[in-house]
Image (tube, rainbow, N blue to C red):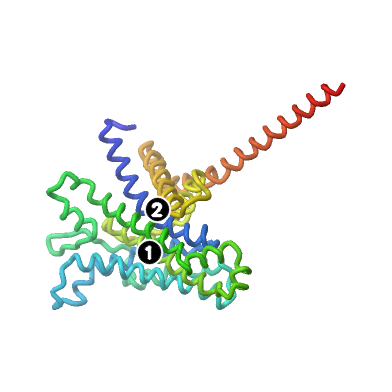
């Protein structure tokens, strides 16, 4: 399967880079699903939204302001800002449907996800793909090409993409760990635990839900934007199945630690994303057909949910047998 150890390291680095990028989406679900207790199914569409907005800024941004004299790296940075703003707007729409229009959270996510397909096509000018590969006529710069240029004369030139992904994940984890300790952050966590108690405490759960979904979707859009820049192409189908990947990563991280410091739990979610991508990479190396990878995702999710259940069931069965054995010994001792 691996021709050399260097081949294995290359595979591991690629899996780590993609795991970190997809881990951002898992961190978004960590906020919306684990903290806010809202199952947001608009993740796939929001991921694609971040991808298309980022790609359009990089490809067409300089043409919008031809006389501005702004450097190309400015548009790569602005693409991330614009993608996160677009993602927060998507989260706002989802939250309004839930809190103001009485639409259930699952249905609200499905409705927004469906609408975002048309929105994403409209943003790209009905282009299914937006190419960010530089040609002899045009040069496109992403945050990854910028980092490669900055590190080209250092020993870390081959890890430039990894540094960008690590920096993004570190900043998001730092933000979540600090934000969830603030008053509004604690209110969001309380809303997910007991909305009735929050309501009786004069805290508006509609407001906390809206803030939580806006932040969550902005992180999802950031993930989509970075993936498009990493692959140097936006595709309208880039977000299909992302919610499954993020949920699997979230569940894998939860196997290691369900309670504890926010930063540690968030870090384990990212570790779960890396494990998931590593399984994906190994499956591809085993020449598994690409049309079976979605099935692999489903199997990983099922195993992640079922294995802890069977382990706990086995422990309960062992305790029951031990109690019956001790009870039998006590009865025999009395006789």
Q: Please identify the quadrant where the C terminus is shown.
A: top right
**Relative to 262, 224 lies left or right:** left
Is residue 148 visible in the rendered structure shown here? yes
> Mark 1 and mark 2: span between their CA atoms?
12 Å
CA neighbours of label 2 inside 10 A, class few (<14), some (14 to 19), many (20+)? many
Residue found 32% across the figure and 68% down from its top: 53
- Of 159 and 59, the residue lying toward us: 159
Please identify the quarter of the rendering in which residue 226 is found. bottom left
The residue labelled by disc 2 is 23
**Which circle's residue, 1 or 2, is located before the other in the chain?**
2
Is residue 298 visible in the rendered structure shown here? no
Q: What percent of the width, then of the height, locates residue 207?
A: 51, 74
SS for callout 2: helix
Please identify the quarter of the rendering in which residue 191 is found. bottom right
Q: What percent of the width, then of the height, locates residue 138?
A: 15, 64
Residue found 63% across the figure and 69% down from its top: 196
Residue found 22% across the figure and 72% down from its top: 61
SS for callout 1: helix
**Relative to 329, 4 lies left or right:** left
CA neighbours of label 1 inside 10 A, class few (<14), some (14 to 19), many (20+)? many
Q: Is residue 45 above or below residue 156?
A: below
Q: What percent of the width, then of the height, locates residue 319?
A: 69, 34
Q: Please identify the quadrant where the N terminus is shown.
A: top left
The residue labelled by disc 1 is 221
Residues tagged 1 and 2 counted as in contact (Cβ below 8 A): no
Q: Is residue 96 above or below residue 11?
A: below
Q: What percent of the width, then of the height, locates residue 119?
A: 40, 72
- Of 48 and 198, the residue lying toward us: 198
Q: Give the number of marks.
A: 2
Please identify the quarter of the rendering in which residue 82 is found. bottom left
């Amino acid at each position: 399967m691996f021709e050399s150890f260097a081949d294995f390291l290359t595979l591991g680095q690629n899996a780590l880079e993609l795991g970190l990028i997809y881990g951002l989406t898992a961190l978004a679900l960590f906020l919306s699903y684990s903290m806010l207790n809202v199952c947001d199914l608009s993740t796939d569409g929001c991921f694609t939204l971040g991808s298309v907005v980022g790609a359009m800024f990089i490809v067409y941004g300089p043409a919008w302001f031809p006389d501005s004299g702004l450097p190309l790296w400015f548009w790569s940075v602005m693409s991330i800002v614009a993608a996160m703003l677009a993602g927060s707007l998507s989260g706002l729409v989802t939250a309004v449907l839930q809190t103001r229009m009485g639409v259930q959270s699952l249905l609200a996510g499905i409705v927004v996800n469906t609408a975002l397909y048309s929105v994403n096509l409209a943003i790209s000018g009905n282009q299914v793909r937006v190419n960010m590969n530089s040609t002899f006529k045009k040069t496109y710069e992403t945050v990854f090409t910028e980092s490669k240029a900055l590190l080209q004369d250092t020993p870390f030139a081959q890890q430039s993409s990894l540094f960008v992904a690590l920096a993004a994940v570190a900043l998001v984890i730092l933000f979540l760990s600090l934000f969830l300790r603030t008053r509004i952050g604690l209110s969001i966590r309380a809303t997910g635990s007991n909305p009735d108690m929050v309501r009786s405490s004069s805290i508006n759960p509609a407001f906390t839900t809206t803030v939580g979904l806006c932040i969550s979707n902005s992180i999802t859009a950031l993930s989509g934007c970075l993936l498009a820049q990493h692959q140097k192409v936006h595709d309208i189908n880039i977000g299909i199945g992302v919610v499954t990947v993020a949920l699997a990563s979230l569940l894998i991280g939860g196997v290691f630690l369900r309670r504890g410091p926010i930063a540690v739990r968030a870090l384990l979610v990212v570790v779960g994303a890396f494990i998931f991508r590593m399984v994906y990479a190994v499956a591809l190396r085993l020449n598994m057909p690409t049309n079976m990878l979605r099935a692999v995702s489903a199997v990983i999710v099922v195993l992640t949910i079922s294995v802890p259940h069977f382990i706990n069931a086995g422990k309960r069965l062992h305790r029951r047998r031990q109690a019956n054995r001790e009870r039998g010994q006590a009865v025999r001792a009395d006789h």
